[in-house]
Image (cartoon, helix red, strand yellow):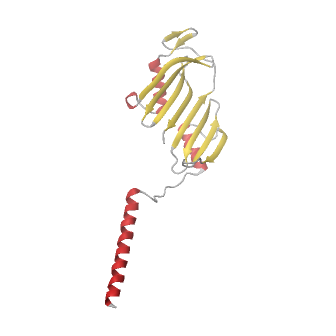
Amino acid sequence: MKNMMMNYLERTRRMILRAVCVTAMIGMIGVGTAYAAVTLDGAKSVALADAGVSESEAVFTEVKEKQEKKEAAKYEIEFYTDEAEYEYEIRKSDGAILEVKVEMFKKEHAHYGSTSGTSGTYISVDDAKEIALKRAGLSESEVRFKKAKLDKDDGIMVYEIEFYHGRSEYECAVDASTGKIVEYDVEIDD
């Protein structure tokens, strides 16, 4: 009887020790870590804050939750203002911005800058790169440029600026006449 009791206690001790070890390992590798999921309204607030737009200025055209196979749940938020159209993908689990697209509405162009073109004076490619970097909140030393060229887009001259920062790819079209951003896109390789 004494041996049975000792065996029982030893098995119980081992099971408890295994449970403690497994619990510690789970804690170390982060399995089961709970994050507060972002609500749909929270995702809208993230997008508006990133765009620098108040809710009263925005007209929402799409606000939905989406989950594709093998991808984390996300929100797709689309809205426009008097000046631009915005599209955001925001991860539901933590509110991280996965993708941003901004397209500025076309307006009359005032000509200024330092490079002459066939229809006026344009800003320099270095100025266009600086404008794109400022919009991204980055400096030239933090990025690797992929493309910076002057091109005609829908009848206006724009600088197409593309660069990488970490695992993110930025694309920005800067009106060569006005220096205004007419299109902006960020893709984060998740």
Residue 2 at x, y percent in the picture = 32, 90
Quadrant of res 17: bottom left
Q: Is residue 106 visible?
A: yes
- The vertical placement of 98 against 82, above or below, is below
Horizontally, is 173 left or right of 165 in the view?
Answer: right
The N terminus - image quarter: bottom left
Horizontally, is 58 left or right of 2 in the view?
Answer: right
- The vertical placement of 66 against 83, above or below, is below
User: Front-most of 4 and 78?
Assistant: 4
Horizontally, is 145 left or right of 69 in the view?
Answer: left
Q: Is residue 57 visible?
A: no
Q: At x 55% / y 36%, what residue is drawn?
A: 100
Residue 46 at x, y percent in the picture = 55, 44
- The vertical placement of 173 against 11, above or below, is above
Horizontally, is 83 left or right of 113 in the view?
Answer: right
Q: At x 39% / y 65%, what residue is drawn?
A: 22
Residue 97 at x, y percent in the picture = 52, 42
User: Front-most of 113 and 30?
Assistant: 30
